[in-house]
Image (spheres, rainbow, N blue to C red):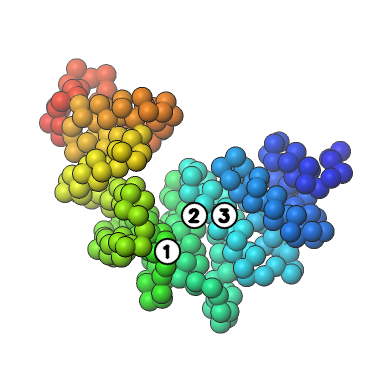
Amino acid sequence: MYHYDLAERVREAEADDLTEVAESAFSELRAKDKAAARAQFDAEIAPLTGTLLAGVAALNAVRKAPDVTFEELRHYAGAVLQKLRWAQPNPLSEQIQLAYERLRAELNADYVARNPARVLIDAADALLHTGNWRRLIEQDHRPLARDAEMLLMLAATLEMRPYDSLRYAYTLSVHARLGGTTKYLQNARDALASLEGFIAPEKTIWPKAYVLCNFALVYEDAALWEEMVGVCQELIPYDPGNAHYHSGIAHAHLGDRYAASEHLGRAVQSNIKFLEKALRDPDYLPLWEGAGSPYYSGRIPKADKH
């Protein structure tokens, strides 16, 4: 038996990962009171405290509603996509992609949307997350990378607000990793440069480091890793944990294990979560490669260790 109160039933279903129950309860709650459903979603499900499973359940309930509007679906899809960005690749991305396919279909049918460039950028991001999941399970991800590229190039022809440009650069870098190409590096640089005078510089340092990291990983570009180290130095006063963590990644790929481990240690001092993260993060693999071998040394570049 589930709670008679629909809002409470959604909470119970989220706590127990009962996605079908959560979707059904949220669908009933929305049909009864759209404002109440949205308020619960915004306050409890969309923030970090809410689970991705509950977010997708709510999104599916809204997507399947016969009276859903473009802007309502966009609101729910955008919030759940943000939760997906915090998660590891997983099959839920395919459910989020379905919502963006519907939004794209309405745009193609000449729906006049507010800020259409952002819809296309987010739709590309959703495709790339699904592509990352398919690559992880060894399925063909290349068509998704091509579709995302097409959407990003289309978005570039439309007017973008400053934070759209920030998201555009981010998504171009995600595409670089999935598509295995750095051909849009300058586009990403230009998008970040366009933020000057519109967004406080300290708010663009972290996205710049993230973008450089993704592009550097494609071809192990030493120049980009060195540039990223410099950007991370700028980031230290604002976000020391992430700054040292990503400096560690850069130094690991440059072959300086001593510097990489030192920066990781500083990140862990800032927050212990960075240790667990590093142990699971494939970007940190160069630091662990050869660990336990007598040839392993923090000061010896990985290319010369044997």
Query: Residue at 36% across / 58% down in the picture?
Result: 199
Question: Could you tell me how many numbered marks the image carries?
Answer: 3
Among numbered discs 1 and 3, the one appearing first in the sequence: 3
Relative depth, front residue between 79 and 109: 79
Query: Residue at 57% across / 53% down in the picture?
Result: 80
Q: In which quarter of the image is residue 225?
A: top left
- How far apart, in angstroms, are the residues tagged by discs 2 and 1? 21 Å
Q: In which quarter of the image is residue 294?
A: top left
SS for callout 1? helix
Q: Do the residues labelled 2 and 1 touch (CB within 8 Å)?
A: no
Left or right placement of residue 259 versus residue 116 in this view: left
Among numbered discs 2 and 1, the one appearing first in the sequence: 2
Vertical position of residue 173 compared to residue 236: above or below: below
Query: Which residue type does callout 3 highlight?
Result: Ala
Q: In front: mark 2 or mark 1?
A: 1
User: Extreme bottom residue here?
Assistant: 110
Would you name the residue on which mark 2 appears? 130
- How far apart, in angstroms, are the residues tagged by discs 1 and 3? 15 Å
Relative depth, front residue between 187 and 164: 164
> Where residue 252 appears, x then y in whole percent?
24, 35
> Where residue 59 appears, x then y in whole percent?
65, 56
Would you name the residue on which mark 3 appears? 79
Would you name the residue on which mark 1 appears? 164
Query: Which residue type does callout 1 highlight?
Result: Asp
Question: In this orientation, does residue 147 appear?
Answer: no
SS for callout 2? helix
The local crowd at label 1, few if under 14, some if 14 to 19, many if 20 or more residues have their Cα within 10 Å, is many
Left or right placement of residue 248 versus residue 56 in this view: left
Q: Are marks 3 and 2 in contact (CB under 8 Å)?
A: no
Q: Do the residues labelled 1 and 3 touch (CB within 8 Å)?
A: no
